[in-house]
């Protein structure tokens, strides 16, 4: 899982299906918006590059990463939405709040994905500091939003 010196965006596009008629719901947390906006831009750009239509991409915001699960559920329960992409940043602080949020979001998004039988991408950047987060939002480790969008497309091709 070590990501040292790796660009996290590298993925195989070979098995990607046509997504020109697919609808995507993106839920973005508003903590660290400079970073989550960059993640969202990466996700949208990736969807468009792979053939999604601009009008088929629906972006919604939630207050913080903890709320990503319910936001994802609101989107996933909509029959028109084919896949959901959840984007947020949780930076470690002096307490264990990050652990609680990260585990809750990982478990929550998994539950939503299985409940609605739809791809729900885990685009949560979980880092020790701001620099590591910036590195993963368009910096030296790529953009986790691109990776999350690619995962959603890949799962739609399953
Ligand atoms: C409270 C909190 C803290 C301390 N840190 C973050 C963070 O780094 N990233 C993030 O997305 N949200 C954080 N939050 C807010 C929680 O996710 C949540 O919005 C609040 O606890 C209200 O439920």
Image (spheres, rainbow, N blue to C red):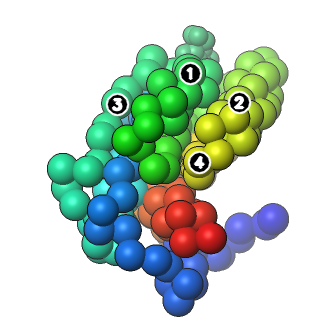
Q: Is residue 55 left or right of residue 46?
A: left
Question: Quadrant location of the N terminus?
Answer: bottom right
Image quarter for ligand 1: top right
Looking at this rendering, what residue extends furthest in the left direction? 55
Q: Earlier in the sequence, mark 3 or mark 2?
A: 3
Residue shown at the point (30%, 62%) measured from the top left: 21
As measured in the structure, the alpha-carbon distance from the residue carrying label 3 to the one carrying label 2 is: 17 Å
Give the image location of residue 119, x and y in percent. 59, 51
Q: Which mark is residue 70?
A: 1
- When the figure is inspected, residue 14 is found, relative to residue 62, above or below; the finding is below
Residue shown at the point (55%, 28%) measured from the top left: 73
Callout 4 touching callout 2 (CB < 8 Å): no
Give the image location of residue 144, x and y in percent. 52, 57
Q: Which mark is residue 60?
A: 3
Residue ID for mark 2: 108
- When the figure is inspected, residue 52 is found, relative to residue 65, above or below; the finding is below
Q: Is residue 94 left or right of residue 59?
A: right
Residue ID for mark 4: 118
Which secondary structure lies at badge 1? helix
Which secondary structure lies at badge 4? loop
Label 2 crowding class (10 Å Cα cut-off): few <14, some 14-19, many 20+? some
Question: Quadrant location of the C terminus?
Answer: bottom right
Callout 1 touching callout 3 (CB < 8 Å): no
Residue shown at the point (57%, 79%) measured from the top left: 11
Callout 2 touching callout 1 (CB < 8 Å): yes
Label 3 crowding class (10 Å Cα cut-off): few <14, some 14-19, many 20+? few
Q: Earlier in the sequence, mark 2 or mark 1?
A: 1
Q: Earlier in the sequence, mark 4 or mark 3?
A: 3
Give the quadrant of residue 49: bottom left
């Amino acid at each position: 899982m070590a990501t040292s010196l790796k660009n996290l965006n590298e993925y195989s596009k070979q098995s990607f299906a046509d997504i020109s008629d697919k609808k995507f719901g993106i839920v973005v947390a508003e903590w660290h918006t400079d970073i989550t906006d960059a993640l969202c831009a990466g996700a949208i750009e990736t969807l468009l590059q792979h053939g999604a239509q601009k009008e088929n991409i629906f972006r919604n915001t939630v207050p913080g990463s903890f709320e990503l699960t319910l936001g994802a559920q609101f989107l996933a329960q909509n029959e028109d939405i084919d896949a959901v992409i959840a984007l947020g940043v949780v930076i470690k602080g002096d307490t264990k709040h990050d652990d609680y949020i990260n585990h809750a979001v990982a478990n929550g998004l998994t539950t939503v994905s299985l409940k609605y039988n739809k791809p729900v991408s885990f685009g949560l950047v979980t880092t020790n500091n701001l620099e590591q987060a910036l590195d993963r939002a368009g910096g030296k480790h790529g953009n986790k939003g691109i990776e999350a969008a690619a995962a959603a497309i890949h799962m739609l091709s399953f």
